[in-house]
Amino acid sequence: MSSVEVCKLVDVPNPGALAVVAEGVPVAVVRDGDGGLHALRDICSHADVALSEGEVDGCTLECWLHGSRFDLRTGQPSGPPATKSVPVYAVRVDGEGDDAVVLVDVTVNAARH
Ligand code: FES
């Protein structure tokens, strides 16, 4: 494990996504509005655009360009045009309140199927 601090928890919209970089990898840190925190590779599997600029709806993140919805737990798209999943990374919170920070490990695929 090599978790790195990427942002403060309070900086992530809830629900919503924040673009960060962890060890050179673009990552979308996502809060689902229902207590869930997720980290996905911040590149759509269909084209080279940032998923963090899309809309969070429940446990999905919708790509803003063509509308594929990616499951925040598995990285799988629920429909076209994307057909491949995006990596889901291990994410955790350290600390409490306004001082809580988000740590991401891009070496661990945390997809839950
Ligand atoms: S670029 Fe994301 S669905 Fe096309």
Image (cartoon, rainbow, N blue to C red):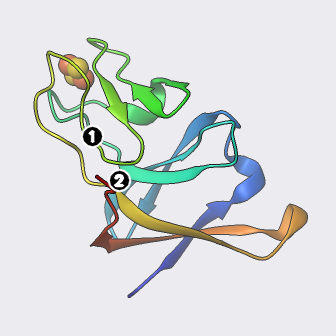
Which residue occupies 16% across, 28% down?
Answer: 47
In the foreground, 81 or 27: 81
User: Label 1 sits on what residue type?
Assistant: Ile
Q: Is residue 19 above or below residue 92?
A: above
Q: Is residue 12 visible?
A: yes
Q: Quadrant of ligand 1?
A: top left
Which residue occupies 27% across, 40% down?
Answer: 43
**Numbered tag placed on residue 26 in the rendering:** 2
> What's the CA distance linking mark 1 and mark 2?
7 Å
* Res 65 → quadrant: top left
Which residue occupies 31% across, 61% down?
Answer: 25
Residue 36 is situated, as x and y percent measured from the top left of the image, at 61, 49
Q: Is residue 107 above or below residue 66?
A: below
User: Label 2 sits on what residue type?
Assistant: Pro
Q: Residues within 10 Å of mark 1 (few under 14, many from 20)?
A: some
Residue 45 is situated, as x and y percent measured from the top left of the image, at 17, 35
Looking at the image, do the residues carrying marks 1 and 2 touch, with CB atoms under 8 Å apart?
A: yes
Q: Is residue 50 visible?
A: no
Q: On the image, numbered disc 1 is attached to which residue?
A: 43
Pointer 1 residue Cβ closer than 8 Å to ligand 1: no
Q: Earlier in the sequence, mark 1 or mark 2?
A: 2
Q: In the visual, does 89 lie left or right of 95? A: left
Q: Is residue 48 above or below residue 37?
A: above
Which residue occupies 69% across, 48% down?
Answer: 35
Badge 2 marks a residue whose secondary structure is strand
